[in-house]
Amino acid sequence: MDSFKKALQKRISEGASRVPFTVRFFTFLHKLVRATAVRSLPRELINPRYFSNMMLRRYGGKFSGDVINVSGWDDGDGEGHRYREYFPKKNSYVVSNAATEAKGIGSMKDSGIQELPLDLNAPLSADLLRRYDVVFNHTTLEHVIHFEQAFENLCALSKDAVIIVVPTLQQVHFGKGYGDYWRPTPIVIAKLFYRHGFTPLVISTNDQAFAAVYIFAIGVREPQAYENRIQPVTQFDMGGQLYGSGLKYADLPELFEDGR
């Protein structure tokens, strides 16, 4: 066992670290305010899943053709519905999953929905290039160790649009068979769209102080086809309601000038 793993085992055996009383006191106050807000505010303001579902309801009907929910597990939206319902103009609908024990292939068994085995860590096979009109991916990229390869795959799968939901501020969440590795910023999502031949149309977050913050993003290959259908959204704030923000929108254009 190497020194890092030994240190980790020691950390596990020692349990939680003691923190000063003042830190624990103000942490308690923060949790109290948060608990009150969570119970008092509308769900769409404090639950990132409701935010992403709201955004998907707003934009899902703008797209048509063949749709794939990549790494979609059982296609559930967390509100008792299925994501396939968000794309009323679809011609076909497929869910992909990885061949793993945790939320992997077989999750769509007996659903009547076609399931495709797909590993986002590995390059796509040639037969999958631009196979689908719309590629949808919800809260998966943070669990893929080869993040840029996964993003490239999402873009390569699509001949028209990519819709991504990924946490930018959230507690660590992992379990047997899957890890938790990344928290991308809205800026890098926009830049990666440009890098892979897409124009970002919607970059938005549920910036608030009481729960996790998600990025909801849409990128398209042919932006002129959506000029009269989707009004561009450039909302790059993340965590500003809680931490304040040093983001200067006037400095953003130069980050996208080279398209990379």
Image (tube, rainbow, N blue to C red):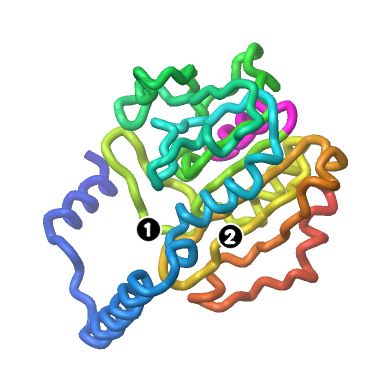
Q: How far apart are marks 1 and 2 (CA)?
A: 16 Å
Which residues make up the magenta segment? Answer: 147-160
Q: Of marks 1 and 2, which one's residue comes earlier in the chain?
A: 1
Within the magenta stretch, is there residue 152?
yes
Q: Decide if residue 150 is on the left or right side of residue 176.
A: right
Q: Whole-percent x and y of residue 29?
A: 29, 83
> Residue 246 lies in what quarter of the image?
bottom right
Q: In this view, does 152 lie to the left or right of 4?
A: right
Q: Can residue 260 be seen in this view?
A: no
In the drawing, what numbered circle is on residue 248?
none
User: In the rendered view, would you say 158 is above or below 181?
Assistant: above
Looking at the image, residue 76 sits to the left or right of residue 200; the answer is left
Residue 169 visible at all: yes
Label 1 CA crowd tier, 10 Å (few <14, some 14–19, many 20+) = few
Give the residue at mark 2: 205
Residue at the spot x=43%, y=60% of the render? 47
Q: Which residue lies furthest to the front in this view?
A: 88
Residue type at the position of mark 2: Thr
Give the labeled residue for mark 1: 171
What is the chief secondary structure element of the magenta stretch?
A: helix
